[in-house]
Image (cartoon, rainbow, N blue to C red):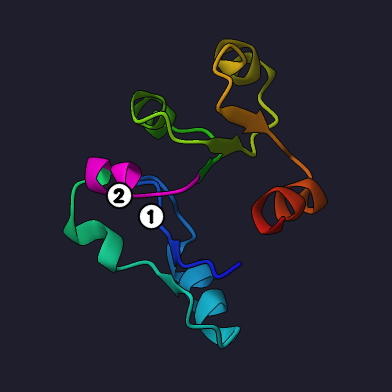
Amino acid sequence: KKIFWLIRFHPRHGNKERIISHLNSINKKNFDFYFFYKFFLSYFLKNSNLLIFENSSVVYDAIKFNLPSICISKNLFLMKKLKKYKKIKFLASEKKIKKEIFN
């Protein structure tokens, strides 16, 4: 599969620069983290194939667009709250996440 990642940091995310530096160092060109801020979030959700999130209200927008999502949080309260939505998978291990994305 060819995948292009649009990465949008949560506004309260504190390690943005470290993550951006790491992403730039891996010498891949299949991601962008600046372009995402030029448009409304709803535009990207409507035109995306998958949302990966940890703990964000963006999941409710994804539900509205019927967008398949992967929750990587281990927050049991969040899992209980969202388990009724069939398009959301809860995958905390890196191995399971990779399998879901790349297969």
Where is residue 3 drawn, in percent x and y?
A: 53, 66
Q: Is residue 76 above or below residue 8?
A: above
Q: Is residue 93 above or below residue 57?
A: below
Q: Nearer the viewer, residue 47 or 74?
A: 47
Where is residue 54 drawn, in percent x and y?
A: 56, 38
Question: Does residue 8 appear left or right of residue 52 in this picture?
Answer: left
Asked whether the residues under the numbered discs 2 and 1 touch, taking CB atoms below 8 Å apart as contact, a structural biologist would say yes
- Badge 1 element: loop
**Res. 87 image quadrant:** top right
Is 45 magenta? The answer is: yes
Question: Does residue 3 appear left or right of residue 42 in this picture?
Answer: right
**Where's the N terminus, which quadrant?**
bottom right
> Which residue occupies 43% across, 50% down?
13
Where is residue 49 drawn, in percent x and y?
A: 46, 48
Which residue is labeled 1 in the image?
8
Residue type pointed to by label 1: Arg
Region of the chain picked out in magenta, as a range: 42-50
Q: Callout 1: 10 Å neighbours few (<14), some, many (20+)?
A: some
